[in-house]
Image: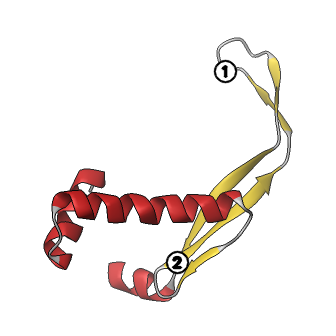
Amino acid sequence: MNKNDLVATVSNAAGLSKADATKAVDSVFEAITDSLKAGQEVRLVGFGTFNVAQRKASEGRNPRTGEKIQIPASNQPKFKAGKRLKDAVN
């Protein structure tokens, strides 16, 4: 499923126009992104939890040349599925 499929599904399920469903989906994604940028966890009971993990700086290798490179520290978004979601797919 891609974003257009998700918008179509939301549109049909909620009885919204595709334009309104697009705004709703975009708003949800934006709200999650903004919360993660602010360092907040987003917990959707039954669905899952979005949070940010800090990745330490490390040393890697360029696979083409074998040259050592420095990989800088970064923040990585993480998602952990909730119990209902896990149960639904199993």
Which residue bears the numbered disc 1? Answer: 63
Q: Would residue 23 appear left or right of 54 to someone viewing this image?
A: left
Q: Is residue 28 above or below residue 54?
A: below
**Number of marks present in the image shown:** 2
Q: Amino acid at mark 1?
A: Pro
**Label number found at residue 48:** 2
Q: Amino acid at mark 2?
A: Gly
x, y percent for residue 79: 57, 66
> Which residue is painted at 81% across and 23% down in the image?
69
x, y percent for residue 5: 21, 57
Q: Would residue 27 appear left or right of 18 to someone viewing this image?
A: right
**Label number found at residue 75:** none
Mark 1 is surrounded, within 10 Å at the Cα level, by few (under 14), some (14 to 19) or many (20 or more) other residues, namely few
Q: Residue furthest top?
A: 65
Q: Do the numbered discs 2 and 1 sit on residues whose CB atoms are within 8 Å?
A: no
Tag 1, which secondary structure? loop
x, y percent for residue 53: 74, 60
Residue 35 seen in the current view? yes
Q: Earlier in the sequence, mark 2 or mark 1?
A: 2
Which picture quadrant has residue 51?
bottom right
> Which residue is painted at 34% across and 84% down in the image?
88
Mark 2–mark 1 distance (CA, rounded to whole Å):
35 Å
Mark 2 is surrounded, within 10 Å at the Cα level, by few (under 14), some (14 to 19) or many (20 or more) other residues, namely some
> Which residue is painted at 49% across and 87% down in the image?
83
